[in-house]
Image (tube, rainbow, N blue to C red):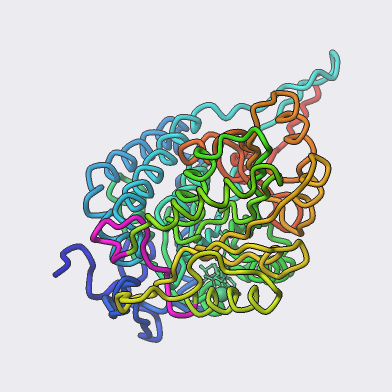
Amino acid sequence: MTTVVPERAGLLIGGDEVDAADGGSFPTYDPSTGEVIARVAAGGERDVDRAVRAAEAAFDAWWPATAPRERAALLYRAAALVRTRADELVELDERTAGLPTRMAAGDVETAARYLEYYAGIADKLHGETIPLGADFVDYTEREPWGVCAVIPPFNVPLQLTARSVAPALACGNAVVVKPAEQAPLPAIRLAQLIIEAGAPDGLINVVTGTGPQAGAALVAHPRVRHITFTGSLPTGQAIMRGAARQLTPVTLELGGKSPQIAFEDADLDALVAAVVATSLMTAGQVCSAGTRILAHREVAPELRGKLLDAVAQIKLGAAHDGPDMGPLISRVQQERVLEAIDAAREDGARVLSGGGIPGNAPAGYFVEPTVLGDVTAQMRVAREEIFGPVVAFMEFSDEAEAIGIANDSEFGLVSGIWTEQLSRAHRVARAVRTGQVFVNHYGAGGGIELPFGGYRKSGIGRAKGLAALDEYLQTKNVCVKIE
Ligand code: NAI
Ligand code: MG
């Protein structure tokens, strides 16, 4: 039935597709049906070592010899190839990551835009000169780390791989990607396109496999000079501990429990549309999902009504049939989300909509879009990232209380503020402890240009925008004595 999903996929090391050293492989599933659709090489320590050495050799040869504009040209060609192959990549995302057609198309387009965005800066990475008086010339150079490890999650696999790989390559690094084991094929395809665009052998390598095997081996490798990880808080903490042994610097983009704050003058229709699109139709599988809806008491009933009406319209279905909302990535995630909903019930929350597996659901990993009411700040559902289509509805009486609830979280990734009052919007934007704040909208079309990262336990460092470049460069100062 499908055309673009290969039956088998190997590792990508030094420009070649190879089997894992021990011959191991693991299955990958279509989340819409639960069927095994491919087997993928299960890399381990030896494979990681080969990939890192290939990357290091490529880095040693390429970076000193390559003009910045050639790095830009490579990334522009890769972006063009992603666009040329968009149909194929969309199908791959639908079949392997369970992304509904519209989201899959967004994932492909956003991946292309990351490649272009960082292509555009590759030849504009300047150092500085520092005046020390007549006796010296002093300048800085911005240099790549060498081999960068990139460990993305499953949810939007093309853009989250491109988001780290593009700036890493733009800055002159080589990369080894360890894709998420639930949906590794899109990242492999992206790497193949970068190679087709002219990347020298070894500049980008992919070692598929599990987190504890391939991922942990990559984190521990002494020749990996930087690690970018996107995923859960506990895994981020494990990676940071692993990286400490070699003192490898890390960029971590972890979870969130992002608030959407609706003041009494909020545009409720716009807010509902944003919540439905970003927190529910994505099956909640995005780190920036605004999962705590804080409503001023005056508008809470109307907002709740509008939200429930909109949720009732969401059509679930197999990703490739182009539904509003697709499945979760795996059986494990489905069970985890259902457990979180049960825990919310136990804690006293009320299920206003959804709350289980949809009746007449296909065999895949579906959970209904779920709205929970009577949620208080101490409940688990208000504190823990669920990564499912579940939003918690809470109420407040004034601005100070709204800010208090918003900041009562160990996370601090994104906030949404909905008000017509200019001063209040700016006041609250200052007061919330999150790395991004959106006022009267949510997301800015993917926000490729906007620095993105967490306060508190939502992470370390920044992805996206020019800010991400600081993660992939180190500064060398050269001080010359003049006779
Ligand atoms: P995870 O954080 O465990 O996995 C993400 C990536 O890290 C995958 O590529 C995985 O193979 C790798 N990994 C896992 N253990 C590793 C280790 N010890 N060393 C190196 N790499 C390792 O997330 P998972 O298991 O997919 O999902 C579990 C929960 O994590 C979700 O329910 C959700 O709450 C959260 N999550 C959050 C994401 C976000 O963007 N905020 C993205 C994905 C998951
Ligand atoms: Mg895990």
The quadrant the N terminus occupies is bottom left
Relative to 193, does residue 380 appear above or below in the rendering? below
In-front residue for pair 353/434: 353
Asked if residue 390 can be seen in this view, the reply is yes
Residue 415, image quadrant: top right
Q: Does the magenta stretch include residue 390?
A: no
Q: Along the horizontal axis of the image, is 135 left or right of 228?
A: right
Relative to 63, does residue 255 appear above or below in the rendering? below
How far across and how far down the image is residue 147, in percent? 55, 56
How far across and how far down the image is residue 409, in percent? 76, 57
Asked if residue 40 can be seen in this view, the reply is no
How far across and how far down the image is residue 140, in percent? 70, 30
What residue is drawn where x is 63% and y is 76%? 345
- Chief secondary structure of the magenta span? loop
What residue is drawn where x is 53% and y is 34%? 449
The quadrant the C terminus occupies is top right
In-front residue for pair 139/362: 362
Residue 4, image quadrant: bottom left
In-front residue for pair 264/133: 264
Q: Along the horizontal axis of the image, is 136 left or right of 49?
A: right
In the orientation shown, which residue stands out farthest toward the left?
Answer: 1
Residue 84, image quadrant: top left
Q: Along the horizontal axis of the image, is 417 left or right of 308?
A: right
Q: How many labels does the image show?
A: 0
In-front residue for pair 4/299: 299
Q: In which quarter of the image is ligand 1?
A: bottom right
Q: Give the range drawn in magenta.
A: 317-332
How far across and how far down the image is residue 212, in percent? 56, 79
Q: Does the magenta stretch include residue 326?
A: yes
